[in-house]
Amino acid sequence: MSTPTAREKTDWDIPHYAGDHHEELSFIRKYVFSTDHKVIAVQFLVMSLVFLALGGFLALLMRWQLGFPGQPLPGGTLLPETMAPGGIILPEFYNSLVTMHGTFMIFFAIMPLLVGVFGNLLIPLQIGAPDMAFPKLNMASFWMAVPAGLIMLASFWVEGGAAGAGWTAYAPLSASGDFTGVYLGQQLWLLSLFILGFSSIAGAVNYITTVINMRAPGLTWFRLPLTVWALFITAVLVLLAMPILAGALIMLLTDQTIGTTFFLPEHGGEPLLWQHLFWFFGHPEVYILILPAFGIVSELLSNGARKAIFGYHAMVLAIAAIAFLGWIVWGHHMFMSGMNPMLGTTFMVTTLAIAVPSAIKVFNWLGTLWKGNIHFHVPFLHAAAFVALFIIGGLSGIFMASAPVDIHIHDTYFIVAHLHYVLFGGSLFAIFGGIIYWFPKMFGRMMNPFWGHVHFVGTFVFYNLVFFPMHGLGLEGMMRRLYDPTQYAWLADLQPWNVFITWAVFGLLAVQVVFFVNFVASIWTGRKAEANPWQANSLEWSVPSPPPHGNFEAMPIVYRGAYEYSPPDRKEDFILQNEPPRDPVGDRVEPEPQPTGGLEGSE
Amino acid sequence: MNWLLEPSVSTFGPDIDRLYYIILVITGIVFVLTEGLLIYFLVRYRKRPDRRAEYIHGSTRAEVLWTLGPLVIVLMLGFMSKPVWDRAKDPAHFPEDALELTVSARQFEWESYYPGAGGDPDAQDAFSILNRVHVPVGEPVILHLEAEDVIHSFFVPRFRVKQDAIPGRTIPVWFEITEPGEYELGCAELCGIGHYLMDGVVVVQSRAEFDAWRAEQHAAALGGTGAAQLAGSGDLDGAPADGPVAEGGL
């Protein structure tokens, strides 16, 4: 068993539990350059919600052009001449929108929300640690993400506009400004992601070290909440994947700037090399964007159903299996790229195989609800919606996993539908649920449940109205990243659908205003939260909301797993992980949860 | 919202469509079962004052069952997909006596190169046309796909053909079309600001019509006439009108 020895150390840089002496911190050290993991989580939250809103706004501009090609955008005259003269979106600006929507959402919204926010907030709290292993590195991680985001944002206003080669930046389009007219914008894009990579790696090192070294006594690996497991495995993926991206980014940057030709064929470069490098990073990245959501949803479903997670060990193994298989499926993004068709077969098999652990997760979530006593609180609703929508996103993935079927749907709106079912229907629903659930641990108050319900129902309805019809558009052959679909006779007939989707996007974004207002207002006016408002089991609920600097009065001792809901020998239907066993003699000895056995206490 | 595919017109198209429908049925069943179960559980096990959730942590038998079930299904899909994939994409399975053309993609147009009547691509009567590909019906055709600047993707939905064109490579694409007609061709890979303007047409003609058309083009290439009558629809804003471009004989 690992034993944190922080309390004996006197070095100011080592985290202390709340009961230890704390010097008063200045405002700057407390809220700006803070080393407190909870403050850093909130900082990441604010940053990524800003980018989430920006990304949504870019999507709206894109949808306007797709729904009403060539018509002036209402209020579009406010945009510079280089983007939308007379309010009409230019094709080069549209390509920047496509690129930056994807970039913002993936790198500056979903990834920092899942990893930056929940990783920072939950890992120390749920393992009973006073803070991260390296609090200063943690601070540096956030303060590297900020300039990365600012550089990315600023690229809209440089000459030539923002990058326009897609978030995948396929070379040679991205490798020379001669093909797009975008020189500096693409270079800033590369630089920004390069810096962000350092931020992610710093975070990952911290998470891995913290989970391995700083778990409270009694908190064995298989007593960890699934959020910690998911974030831990995600951190391993980040640590291994981001350096690959960094290398590829540097190669592309030197192609752009100093005349190397890694990806430019006229001097012996190979465009497919970029795709291999990018997707060798990119597919693990896809799982970085969903695994923490798996953890959050497991937590929320189990809490709502007042029942232990079904098949805890299977859930952990499924996360690990997905993380492993995620490294050997990247070629399915390249079925149509012209790589050897033999490779297509190989990647088809591995890709189909990843459906198995995904199915295991879905069945175990259903098993968790089975014979539960379901409290439909707002976080639970988001988790249930996650399951419903992840099923659709997972099943649509089977179509494209079959390489011959992918011939027809590759690079069409079918893919757009699929990825949004996983990243929005999946990840973002989990994020909304998670923010509402752990809001008291960040701000000490509860978010308003009525407006929470309004936001949930509106989002669920409009979300499906936006993205479900895109399956059909893709099957009809509507290509992705198309500035004006009416240019193609066979797509012109589909225009009513594009108009419909655009109106639905207006609805979807309007509903998000409800969330943002509820979020901001609840920080100051929400109901004050008690320590354990959801009657949950894990360690963060044993301390006040919000927890003090140092989190726990003293090092907690853990007696049981995180999902001991509705134990038969108790009146309450929950029991905190660190609640001492009541009467070890007279009462029944505290149950050791051993669902499948054999794996307990593997340390 | 239509889950049915527009009928394909290539020889391997129906195989792809069959696979699509098989997956549609399987995923459809799984969809109904899982979503149905989800809704049923949400209703059946909703909170009641007198109810307490059961203290259950899992079932090894269930885990084995729902691991093996999906595994068998996806393995089966893999086995069914492989021959269809090989037939459509693997050059080792391409027919031997096919009509061979070169199609080159550039920002933002397609150009099809036809060799001279004797088969020599550099002959005086070799010619090329923009944004159109003429092929005979009922005969295998191999297109050697090239890209001159960035990546494009040759996509003819009705053929169930899609292939990226990569600069620096020549990638063979084959198909055999069963119904004459004019089929729209698009670019499926973001290739720059004119990506949305890369539409074209694949004209599938009877052998006789195709031969007549080709003879006319050969003659035009030699004599430098005949271009006007074949000028295409010219529907691309700012792009050169579709139609033949004299080529070869340098």
Image (cartoon, coloured by chain):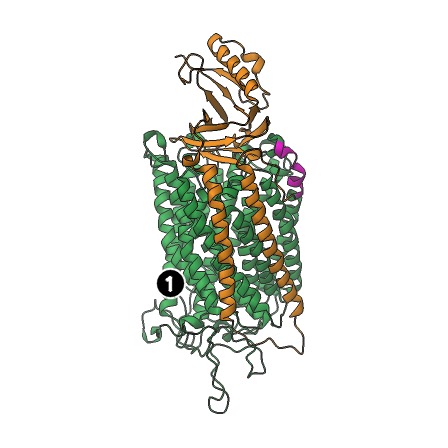
Q: Which residues fall within the magenta stretch?
A: A490-500
The quarter of the image holding the N terminus of chain A is bottom left
Residue at x 59%, y 83% (from the top left corner):
A571
Task: Please name the color used to draw chain B.
Answer: orange
The quarter of the image holding the C terminus of chain A is bottom left
Q: Where does the image place residue A99, in percent across and percent down from the top left?
A: 49, 41
Say which quarter of the image contains residue A168. top left
Secondary element under disc 1, as helix, strand or loop, is helix
Q: Where does the image place residue A573, in percent across and percent down from the top left?
A: 58, 78
Q: Where does the image place residue B19, in percent across and percent down from the top left?
A: 55, 45
On the rendered structure, is A48 left or right of A254?
A: right
**Nearest the eye: B154 or A168:** B154
Task: Please name the color used to draw chain A.
Answer: green
**Would you say residue A494 sits in the magenta stretch?**
yes
Residue placed under numbered mark 1 in the picture: A208
Mark 1 is surrounded, within 10 Å at the Cα level, by few (under 14), some (14 to 19) or many (20 or more) other residues, namely many
Q: Where does the image place residue A156, in percent across and percent down from the top left?
A: 49, 39
Relative vertical location of residue A21 with respect to residue A114 in this rendering, above or below: below
